[in-house]
Image (cartoon, helix red, strand yellow):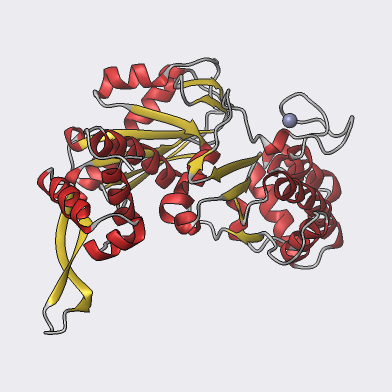
Amino acid sequence: MPLRQQIFEYVRSHGSAARAEITQALDISAGSVTTLTADLIAEGVLQEIEDTRRATSRGRPRVALRIVPQAAYVIGIKLAFNKHSAILADFTGNIVATANVPSDVKRRSTATLFQEIDTLIALVLSDADKPMSEVKAVGLGLPGIIDHDQATVTWSSLLTDGDQDLPTEFKRRYGVPLFIDNDTNMLALAEQWFGEGRDKTDFAVVTIENGVGMGLVSDGQLYRGSNGMGLELGHTKVQMDGALCRCGQRGCLEAYLGAYALTREAITALDIADATALKNDDILETLLNKAKAGDRAALAIFKRAGRYLSVGLANVIQLFDPPLIIVAGDRMQHEYPYAEAIFKDAQDMTLSTRSKPCQIHIRAWDDRVWARGATALALSFLTETMISGHTGATA
Ligand SMILES: [Zn+2]
């Protein structure tokens, strides 16, 4: 990574930083920091502010650097099963405006998808009171297999057709680049830019929603695999000839752990009358409430799913040895029954030496986190083109 980009990234991840701190943290000469930050200030992406944290010996405030928030704006979009959301963020990643629209169509054509995207963008721009001309890039996350390099949606549970090239049509409509990625990668990016992964070079994210997903940041980079289908934890097999999965195969982890699997069990075990009239979310809510109230059948469903979650987490630890796994998902906003025991079982199933066990944390749910990850995707691109696109000194 070019030195000037390293400086920029350091300031970004720390909110603000004095030149002396940057010199020390990146182990480069004070002269280089002075020159490169002067360039970045001249280009309008960094600015000097009063460093309120420290003062000189004479009591005068010192100077720190921060990113100029208005240097560029981006939009991050998350398309999902029940709701689409969008965030407009400034160049520091701070949220300026948000918008949500319900998504009740199960699968749609690309044309319908673009109508939904148009509505979202119009709403978020109006909430921010900004014209599209101030938006320099858009990030989009959706479930499925996304070929990040080719920028095509190979397959998505939201679309009727495969192999869709969304960025070309987007550029034609809006005149700005669109970056797409798998929704779980978005979440990993959100954690890396704004969350618990901020000061970590390695960590994993495991999501439990309708399906089960995984994202991995390794050596500071998002791991994507060669075809965009790496880390599909939900479709790793945990049982030969086991339960039927949505993907058509049998014995996949998510066929035991995903929301749809729990719903399927709940309908039978809880004797829910007229289940076809109920939404899956409502059935899950009923299941969770019953479990909280101590209903044995409901608790047994969570206990069984929890054993599979332990296996999944143990496999992640054994394969990647991350220092941290963040377990996130819609239902994680509630207290997941047996969470502590599940995490302990996962540790027990690994060859951990126990001197430094992998930390497993539940991500308290914030609905905006996915769309924020999509803003991070757009911001990564902008940082690359605006900051490192120049010929500067390299490390
Ligand atoms: Zn599967």
Quadrant in which ligand 1 is drawn: top right
* Residue 146 rendering spot, x and y as whole percentages: 53, 26
Q: Quadrant of the C terminus?
A: top left
Q: Is residue 126 left or right of residue 232?
A: left
* Residue 115 image-quadrant placement: top left
Which residue corresponds to the image point at 10% horizontal and 46% vertical from the top-left? 42
In this view of the protein, can residue 51 be seen by the observer?
Answer: yes
Q: Is residue 191 above or below residue 214?
A: below
Foreground: 278 or 158?
Answer: 158
Which residue corresponds to the image point at 23% horizontal and 47% vertical from the top-left? 128
Q: Quadrant of the N terminus?
A: top left
Which residue corresponds to the image point at 30% horizontal and 26% vertical from the top-left? 177
Foreground: 284 or 274?
Answer: 284
* Residue 123 rendering spot, x and y as whole percentages: 29, 39
Q: Is residue 79 above or below residue 287?
A: above
Q: Is residue 236 above or below residue 90?
A: above
* Residue 325 rendering spot, x and y as whole percentages: 62, 54
Foreground: 253 or 302?
Answer: 253
